[in-house]
Amino acid sequence: MTLILTDEEVALADSVRKFVADRSPLTSLRQIIASGEPFDAGVWKQMTAQLGLAGLTIPESYGGAGAGYSALSVALTELGAGLVASPLLGCLLAAEAVLRLGDDTAKQELLPKIAAGELIVTLAVASSAGGQVTASGAGDGTVLTGTVSPVLNGAEADVLLVPADGTDGKAIYLVQGGADGLARTRLTAVDHSRSLARITLAGTPARALAGDAAAALAAAADLANLALAAESAGAMKACLDMTSGYARIRVAFGQPIGAFQAVKHRLADMEKSFELGYAALRDAARAADEKPGDFPVAASVARVLLASAYAEAAVDTVQLHGGIGFTWEHDAHLYYKNGLSNKVLLGGPGEQLDRLADALGI
């Protein structure tokens, strides 16, 4: 694989881009915000049933496409450009954890339904300061106690996969959305395209999943880095296109503002940062498919570069649009809030650099 998209990936990108333009433009996000709903259920159904996005990395034997991580990064880049609100990221992380655990019963039970969009499953993990859950009992008498926050689509999930510490160490437990003792509180998020919740478990019945929980969680963390890097790349490119386009038509002192060095230099810096980050993203996707041993480092590098660059580009987007960029009516602030969220979600830059240092043995 090279950094250049294959013909199949170009076709996938075109399909997702057209879908976003037709079915989920930014006006739809504003409607979702006004409705108080976490996402458009009709759009989510089409994303899964027609485009098959939830099953891209799920093997064909479990109803997925088995397309690999490079294809997934291409799709997520286009979804990120459009700030599409959906439970996709939570489902992807849950599916990755189930695949890595190797619990055959859980695979058969969850993966086909995730791929088909019939079940919203999320992995209840947060940053290192996001709470702790403990398990007690055994077998059918296993219960969980504790809090995790924030959890992607925790309020909407039909099934939650909850890491918890028990007498035999850390394991991942399956919790049904309607289980006794489970309380879910939707949080007010800075980013309107994300649905986040606080999960509280008080003697909540759960089923332990077989397999190496630490390895599964590490794999999910790597995938989260790739996914958030891809979404950030798409959104950053949208910011760059939006701002450079505005700089060509906004006139001040008799000429477009793009003619002024103060504007040109900032746009050039945005372009440079995007190209560097996008190259790192493509390298991480290559590693995921071809050299899994290199993936943790490559994914962390892509996330660190793109999350920070996107957050800075979103600030520049607001500022270079002048007064209109600060208004609710303009789309710039939607990217600004998304950029803040992408930078810290599931572990901010500090945690990612620590993870990168550990992977490099520093």
Image (spheres, helix red, strand yellow):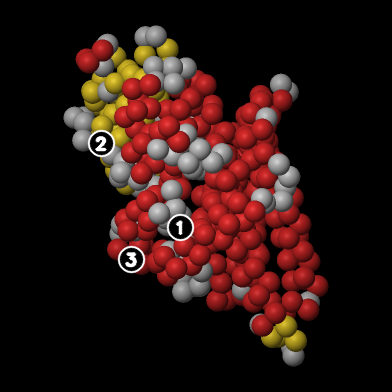
Residue 206 position in % (x across, y down): 27, 23
| Residue found 57% across the figure and 76% down from its top | 323
Specify few, some or many for label 1: CA neighbours under 10 Å numbering under 14, 14-19, or 20 or more: many
Of helix, strand and loop, which one carries label 3?
helix
Residue 84's disc is 1
Q: Residue at x 22, y 15 (%)?
A: 140
For label 2, the SS is loop
Q: Which sits earlier in the primary sequence, circle 3 or circle 2? A: 3
Nearer the camera: disc 3 or disc 2: 2
- Name the image quarter holding residue 313: bottom right
Q: Nearer the viewer, mark 1 or mark 3?
A: 1
The amino acid pointed to by label 2 is Gly
**SS at mark 1 in the image:** loop
Q: Is residue 361 visible?
A: yes
Instruction: Tell me how far mark 2 sits from mark 1, CA to CA.
Output: 24 Å
Q: Is residue 231 above or below residue 238?
A: above
Residue 149 in sight from this viewpoint: no
Classify the position of the N terminus by image quarter.
top right
Residue located beneath label 3 in the image: 34
Residue 60 horizontal/vertical position (percent): 45, 36
The amino acid marked with disc number 1 is Val
Which residue is under mark 2? 177
Please identify the residue farthest to the left as the structure is shown: 180
Q: Nearer the viewer, residue 50 or 295?
A: 50
Against 156, residue 356 (above or below) is above
Q: Is residue 63 left or right of residue 69?
A: left
Find residue 303 and report its image quarter. Answer: top right
Upstream in the sequence, badge 1 or badge 3? 3
- In the rendering, at what x and y percent does residue 114 appear? 37, 39
Q: CA distance from mark 1 to mark 3?
A: 15 Å
Q: Which three-letter amino acid code belongs to the residue tagged 3? A: Ala
